[in-house]
Amino acid sequence: MFDWIQNKTELQLLKEKYCKLMKKSYQLALSDKKKSDALNLEAKQLLSKIKDYEAEKEIAS
């Protein structure tokens, strides 16, 4: 019932930021290729952090 009050984990925050960056990158791709590429690179780096974080979590389990 009060899920919206619950604090988000670091992994959830990273995933949300990744989604926002990818959406923005896609929208910019239509008008500004350089900015789109820069955002896409940032999103890829964030994705690697997400994968590392998930791998650490999996090993710990």
Image (cartoon, helix red, strand yellow):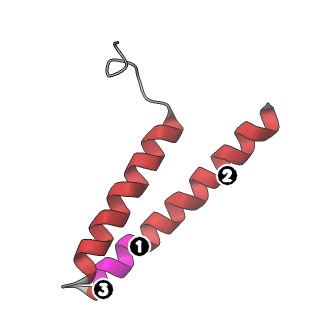
Are there few (<14), some (14-19), or many (20+) residues within 10 Å of tag 3?
Answer: few
Identify the residue shown where x is 79% and y is 33%: 60
Task: Provide residue 21's location: percent of width, then percent of height.
Answer: 35, 61
Mark 2: which amino acid?
A: Asp
The answer to whether 35 appears left or right of 43 in the picture is left
Quick one: which residue is furthest to the left in this view?
A: 31
Which residue is the site of mark 2? 52
Q: Secondary structure at mark 1?
A: helix
- 36 over 59 or under it: above or below: below
> For the residue marked with disc 1, what is the amino acid?
Asn
Q: In the image, what residue occupies the spot 46% across and 48% down? A: 15
The majority secondary structure of the magenta stretch comes to: helix
| Quadrant location of the C terminus in the rendered image | top right
Secondary structure of residue under mark 3:
helix
In the figure, 14 relative to 60: above or below?
A: below
Going by the numbered disc 3, the residue's amino acid type is Lys
Q: Pointer 3: what residue?
A: 34
Residue marked by disc 1: 40
Say which label, 1 or 3, has the lower sequence index: 3
Residue farthest front in this picture: 1
| Cα–Cα gap, marks 2 and 1 | 18 Å
Per the model, the C-alpha gap separating discs 1 and 3 is 10 Å
Q: Is residue 32 magenta?
A: no
Image quarter hosting the N terminus: top left
Q: Position of residue 34 (x, y in %)?
A: 30, 86
Residue 46 image offset from top left, x and y in percent: 50, 58
In this picture, which residue range is highlighted in magenta?
34-39
Asked whether disc 1 touches disc 3, contact meaning CB atoms under 8 Å apart, the reply is no
Coordinates of residue 13 in the picture (x, y in percent): 43, 41
